[in-house]
């Protein structure tokens, strides 16, 4: 029989290898956030990259921090050879693998699942210079670190909107989430800006769950639709995109969800709004 003492020392040994469980908050990072793409941009001003469907992460030189200021419980071995330079990127487990990365990074203790994760770095927030200049610094920092799961995001140029949209179609067909455009002559700053643009086949946004509508027919006794509220105060319903299990146990009141939609009505309500997931960070 295993004694309590043996269990205690087993836990201590695991913490020495993985690092201490982290349940504290850091300062919320002031990150650059993206606007939605609109036709007519001067695309020669922008670098293009793949949008990675993972969890945004800011490396402050000591911890990986979420967009909301929570510290990810990454194992010591994952970050011990990271550079001291602050880095902005995405914790990613591969295309169409959001559920995998979510199951790994939302746990409050370090574990072996982090071996599935790559930190895709797309900017150096503290570096001096424009994005054009920061890109070369970024590649130098990543190469010197020599950490296989620390990778610089590939950036490229397109000649016009036709090439951009053809690239989007091809990459989405291959499983990509979408594309990001970053203005080359921009300096890093926090907040939403046209210096960073998101382009997807469909748009997505976030809203707070404020109520429910009961289901009918085959969904009787379950949730039929969520009543959600946008940051600006607009309320509307989302009734599609849910599994039966999610209808039996819907997102709780007050939780933040991500939904997809295709444009807006004349009243500003998202068209064909459909549930994507609960925001987990």
Image: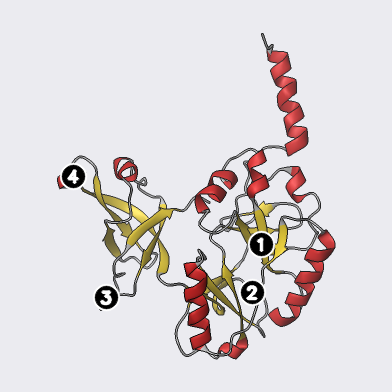
Q: Mark 4 to mark 2: distance in Å?
A: 49 Å
Q: Is residue 98 above or below residue 156?
A: above
Q: Mark 4 to mark 3: distance in Å?
A: 29 Å
State the mark number for residue 218. Answer: 4
Q: Pointer 3: what residue?
A: 265
Q: Pointer 2: what residue?
A: 189
Tell me, yes or no, whether the two marked residues, 2 and 3, touch with CB atoms within 8 Å: no
State the mark number for residue 107. Answer: none
Is 203 on the left-hand or right-hand side of 9?
left
Residue 136 visible in the current orientation? yes
The image shows a total of numbered marks equal to: 4
Q: For the residue carrying disc 3, how many other residues have a C-alpha within 10 Å: few (<14), some (14-19), or many (20+)?
A: few
Return the disc, 4 or 2, that comes first in the chain's sequence: 2
Question: Which one is in front in this view, the residue at disc 1 or the one at disc 2?
Answer: 1
Tell me, yes or no, whether the two marked residues, 1 and 4, touch with CB atoms within 8 Å: no
Residue 175 lies, in percent from the top left, at 50, 63
Q: Mark 1 to mark 4: distance in Å?
A: 43 Å
Q: Pointer 1: what residue?
A: 120
Kindly state the secondary structure of the residue where label 1 is placed: strand
Q: Residue at x 71, y 62 (%)?
A: 151
């Amino acid at each position: 029989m295993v004694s309590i003492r043996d269990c205690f020392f087993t836990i201590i040994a695991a913490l020495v290898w993985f690092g201490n469980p982290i349940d504290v908050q850091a300062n919320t990072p002031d990150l650059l956030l993206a606007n939605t793409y609109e036709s007519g941009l001067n695309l020669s001003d922008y670098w293009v990259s793949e949008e990675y469907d993972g969890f945004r992460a800011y490396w402050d030189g000591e911890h990986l921090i979420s967009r909301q200021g929570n510290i990810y419980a990454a194992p010591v071995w994952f970050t011990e050879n990271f550079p001291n330079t602050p880095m902005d990127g995405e914790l990613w487990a591969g295309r169409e693998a959001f559920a995998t990365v979510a199951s790994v990074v939302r746990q409050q203790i370090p574990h072996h699942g982090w071996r599935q994760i790559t930190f895709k770095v797309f900017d150096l927030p503290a570096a001096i210079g424009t994005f054009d200049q920061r890109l070369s610094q970024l590649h130098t920092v990543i190469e010197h670190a020599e950490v296989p799961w620390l990778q610089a995001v590939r950036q490229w140029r397109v000649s016009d909107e036709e090439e951009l949209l053809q690239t989007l179609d091809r990459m989405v067909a291959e499983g990509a989430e979408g594309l990001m455009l970053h203005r080359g002559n921009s300096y890093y700053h926090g907040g939403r800006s046209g210096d960073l643009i998101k382009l997807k086949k469909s748009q997505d946004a976030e809203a707070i769950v404020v109520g429910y509508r009961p289901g009918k027919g085959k969904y009787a006794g379950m949730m039929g639709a969520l009543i959600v509220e946008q940051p600006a105060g607009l309320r509307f319903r989302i009734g599609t995109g849910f599994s039966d299990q999610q209808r039996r146990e819907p997102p709780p009141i007050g939780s933040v969800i991500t939904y997809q939609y295709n444009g807006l009505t004349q009243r500003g309500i998202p068209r064909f709004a459909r549930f994507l997931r609960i925001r987990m960070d």
